[in-house]
Amino acid sequence: MSVRENLNGAALDMRAVGKRFGPRTVLDGLNLHVPVGQFIAVVGRSGCGKSTLLRLVAGLDKLDDGELNRHDAGQVRVMFQDARLLPWKTVLDNVGLGLDGDDRQDRARQALDEVGLADRGHEWPVRLSGGQRQRVALARALVHRPRLLLLDEPLGALDALTRIDMQQLIERLWRQYRCTTLLVTHDVGEAVALADRVVLIENGRVGLDLPVDLPRPRDRADPRFVALESRVLARVLGQDTGAS
Ligand SMILES: Nc1ncnc2c1ncn2[C@@H]1O[C@H](COP(=O)(O)OP(=O)(O)OP(=O)(O)O)[C@@H](O)[C@H]1O
């Protein structure tokens, strides 16, 4: 088992990765290769190991078997379902956390502007809505210009309309920065709307790896969108008949 930083052009390369918690095998022989700049959505049944996969990639947990190649930890940023902002720091200081240099305030301000919160930098996080807090968390991740962005169900706690706004924001910023992105989501529609590839985790490995070759921004009413969404959903629910 090893984590290395020799990527040969890929952003992430996982080979025969295994992960156990005590007697429970969560990931078993998982292979995943992600070219630089791709947007991958990771879906699957609750408990299938999506967050475990992300934690391994983030370096927050250790693999038991196999090999994982990725950028060094400083070039990887993670965003979770809860924004995890420091309540005793202003919004701007939360975004600027960990930045060095005289221009750190300017960079934090620019990042806040990019997520549509230029005028809220002086506020305490508690004064923001859940959606706004997630925008701040996104700004805090992007201000470092990561090469790999890991999103663990970042929109899971938001209402449907805020969620769609945030999906549009994530897509816009991804198109702007082209930073390789892994999004864990329960929402198959969200996966098909945002990702270049939808990867389904099943029995500890990649059970389905489906390219989404549709123009952006995606039209959810497009019959090709609906067909892809149904196909993934059927597979998640274990009802795939094998027909494509
Ligand atoms: N630190 C841990 N110790 C023990 N078991 C763990 C630990 N982390 C995860 N697990 C177990 O590993 C399995 C996969 O968990 P994981 O959180 O990766 O699933 P998931 O697909 O992200 O689930 P969900 O969609 O419900 O968030 C679960 O059975 C979980 O209980």
Image (cartoon, grey):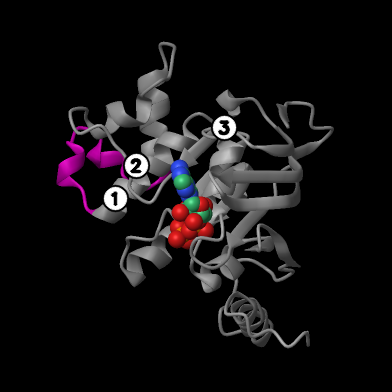
Residue 229 shows in this picture? yes
Distance between the alpha carbons at the discs numbered 3 and 1: 27 Å
Is the Cβ of the residue at disc 3 closer than 8 Å to that at disc 1?
Answer: no
Query: Upstream in the sequence, badge 3 or badge 1?
Result: 3
Q: The magenta stretch spans which residues? A: 114-129
Q: Which mark's residue is nearer the viewer, 3 or 1?
A: 3
Distance between the alpha carbons at the discs numbered 2 and 3: 23 Å
Q: Which mark is residue 43?
A: none
Q: Classify residue 16 as left or right of residue 195.
A: right
Q: Could you classify mark 3 by the number of other residues whose Cα lies within 10 Å: few (under 14), some (14-19), or many (20 or more)? A: some
Amino acid type at image mark 1: Gln
Query: Upstream in the sequence, badge 2 or badge 3?
Result: 3
Residue at which label 3 appears: 59
Residue at which label 1 appears: 132
Q: In x, y percent, where is residue 2?
A: 72, 29
Residue at which label 2 appears: 136
